[in-house]
Image (cartoon, helix red, strand yellow):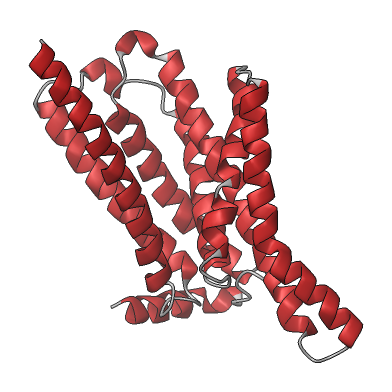
Amino acid sequence: MTAQANNNSAVVPILMASVVCAAVSNTIVRRIALVPLKHYPYLLTQMQGLIYALVYGSILFHRYRDGAVTVEMLRISKRPFLWIGFWDSLGDILGNIGTSHLPGYQTPLLAKLNIIFTAVFSNWILKRTYSLSQVGAMAVVLCGSVVSILPSVLGRILVVEGGDGESASTTSSLFYVGVYVASVAPTALAFVLKEEIFECHRHLNLDIFVVNTYGSVVSLAFTILLLPLASVPGIGEVPLRELAAYTRNGLDCFM
C-alpha cells in the first residue's frame, strides 16, 4: 500500500508538468502557425477543430471498445452541446484573430482572464461561491492582465498628444486586445457548461472523452458555419462573394 501511494505521489507531479509543457507548446505552435496564416485565422480554427474531433473521437472509440465508456454515457442529451460547440468555436475564432495581431507577451497574460470569467459563470450557472482569498487571487490576475495592455494604452495617449502618424496602428492594437478579451468569455462559458453536464450525469460517472468528443464535433460544425464572420469589418473584411476563394487561398497557404 505504501509503495503504491509513493508511486501515485510521484505520478501527480509528472502529470502536472506534462500539462504545463503541453499548454506552453500549444501556445508556441499556435503563434508560429499564425505567422503564415495571419490572414486566415478561420482556417486555422477549422483545422484545430478537426484535429480535436479526430483525436478525441479515436480515444473515445478505444475506451468504448475497452468497456470504460458505456452505452448510457453515449446516450446523454446532445442539446447542451449545441451551446458548448457554439461558444467554443466563437472563442477559438476570436482568439486566433486577436493572437495574430498582438505581441507574444500579451496573449498569455490576457488569457488568464479565463479564470475570472470562469468564476463568474460558475457562480451564475453552478451557484458556486468563492472565498475572500480566492477573490483576492482573481484581483491579482486581473491586475496582471491590465498591466499587459498598458503599453498599448500609453502608446495611444502619447500618439494623441504627439499627433504623429501612428494613431491608426495604436488604435488597431487596442481593438485586437478587445477582440482577444472577447474570446476568453465564450471559452470560459463553454467550460462551465461542460462542468454542468458532469454534475447532471454524476450517477453515470461520465467519461471526459464523451463530453470532449461531442463538444469538439459540434464546435467544428459551428466553426464552418461561422465562416461568414470573415466578412465583418475589423475581424476579416473578406467580401461574402470571395469566401470560397479565401478558403482556397488559406488551404494553399496551410499546405
Q: Residue at x 61, y 30 (%)?
A: 119
Asked if residue 56 lies left or right of residue 26, the reply is left
Placement of 205 over or under 214, stated as above or below: above
Answer above or below: position of 248 versus 113. Answer: below
Residue 124 in sight here: no
Q: Quadrant of residue 76?
A: top left
Q: Is residue 135 left or right of residue 23?
A: right
Residue 45's place in the image compared with 202, above or below, is below
Please state which of residues 253 and 14 is positioned toward the viewer in this rendering.
14
Q: Residue furthest bottom?
A: 165
What percent of the width, then of the height, locates residue 153?
77, 68
Residue 15 visible in this rendered orientation of the protein: yes
Is residue 68 or residue 8 the one in the foreground? 8
Across and down, in percent, residue 172 comes to 71, 75
| Above or below, comparing residue 185 to residue 29 in the picture | above
Residue 55 position in % (x across, y down): 23, 47
Residue at 31% across / 12% down in the picture? Answer: 204
Q: In percent of the image, x 43 and y 78: which residue is there? A: 35
Q: Quadrant of residue 131?
A: top right
Q: Is residue 219 found left or right of 242 in the rendered image?
A: left
